[in-house]
Amino acid sequence: MIPLVDLKIQYEHHKDELRKAIENVLSSSSFILGKQVSTFEKNFAEFIGSVYAVGVASGTDAIHLALRATGISPGDEVITAVNTFFATSAAIELAGGRPVFVDCDPKTYLIDVNTIKKAITSKTKAIIPVHLYGQVAPMDTINAIAEKHNLIVIEDACQAHGAQYKNRRAGSWGKAAAFSFYPGKNLGAFGDGGGVTTADETVYQNLLGLRNYGSTKKYYHPTFGMNSRLDEIQAAILNVKLRFLEEWNKARIRAAERYRRNLESNPSITLPAKADHSTHVYHLFVIQVPGSRDLIIEKMAEKGIYCGIHYPIPLHLQKAYAYLEYKEGDFPHAESLTKKIISLPLFPEITDDQIDSVCEILTRLCTEGSE
Ligand SMILES: *Cc1c(COP(=O)(O)O)cnc(C)c1O
């Protein structure tokens, strides 16, 4: 059996250290906003190459609170990619904003910068580029557009821990950036968790209040806020795991390169294109296949190989967004990709043999399928 993601091996490898970290929190009995969270925030900001990091309860909240901390208010339009995970746009709603979708580049799957300009109106306040699958969106161009139109840029870096664009990490390009530490992400906790990075002192101060009932001094509430904190146990786990992130990203890259070598001679399979100026940390390895994608996934599963689809329905066609009144045909690139993409099994510990068997079966199915 080859799963899409295997979290057990990593736990087994680092079991002693992880259990000790958890045990230390339990015996200290400091569970909320203690030493583990502040240590992690310092280390994570440094790793990203930003100034501040603020631990929050999830990636969704990281985006939501980053929007509020940078001044997005009800009624503001926020532009984002239509081919992202639902949480990106859900976070816009949580902040009171109105999501405005744009299409993706059909090759890199990243937000199409040319369509951003066309989506800007007098109500637009922010852009959320999504560093989808582990590659960084073209931040130079996006920041230039934002500057020209006086817009705020919030990076959705939930799939790109450690990825670089022009030698600077994802999370150091926008006014603020959001990370998820959901267990399956490149850096994952043992439950929900998230973080915001920023180099802006005011945004940082706002975030400290927003995640803690609008308060940075107990029982004093100069502003409104909510309860959205990274807890000490998750932070302790992340403090251990952060030290291995680069090693794990390298292992993902090695696995992806093996997939490429194995599959590149098959003209019916489209491999992920590398985006300009960006490294790829392969949160996901997404290919396009000919014929019936769903049948291929089903046949792979029959052989014990579990693939994924990220994502089967573009956001504008989700029922929840009926009120935005988009229609089929509005985003042709995303709509076409949605029908062809498959995410192959990928995690740092995947073996060469596992990759080779995925490729062997996939190649056979794709060749049959295209005949
Ligand atoms: C995972 C993810 C999120 C949300 O993170 P949660 O921690 O699950 O709330 C947001 N955007 C993208 C692109 C993601 O992959």
Image (cartoon, helix red, strand yellow):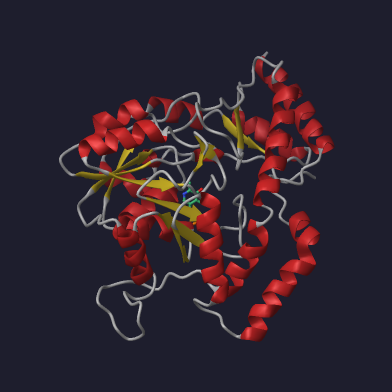
The answer to whether any part of residue 268 appears in the image is: yes
Q: What percent of the width, then of the height, locates residue 208?
A: 38, 69
127 or 88: nearer the viewer: 127
Q: Quarter of the image holding residue 138?
A: top left
Q: What percent of the width, then of the height, locates residue 268?
A: 64, 17
Q: Quarter of the image holding residue 211?
A: bottom left
Residue at 26% in and 30% down: 117
Q: Could you tell whether 184 is left or right of 170 in the image?
A: right
Quarter of the figure that contains the C terminus: top right
The answer to whether any part of residue 120 appears in the image is: no
Q: Could you tell whether 43 is left or right of 87 in the image?
A: right
364 or 280: nearer the viewer: 280
Q: What percent of the width, then of the height, locates residue 167?
A: 52, 37
Residue at 46% in and 48% down: 171
Q: How many marks?
A: 0
Classify 199 as above or below 17: above
219 or 203: nearer the viewer: 203
Q: What percent of the width, then of the height, locates residue 190?
A: 63, 64
Quarter of the figure that contains the N terminus: top right
Residue closest to the far right: 353
Q: Quarter of the image holding residue 7?
A: bottom right
Classify 92 as above or below 141: below
Residue at 38% in and 45% down: 174
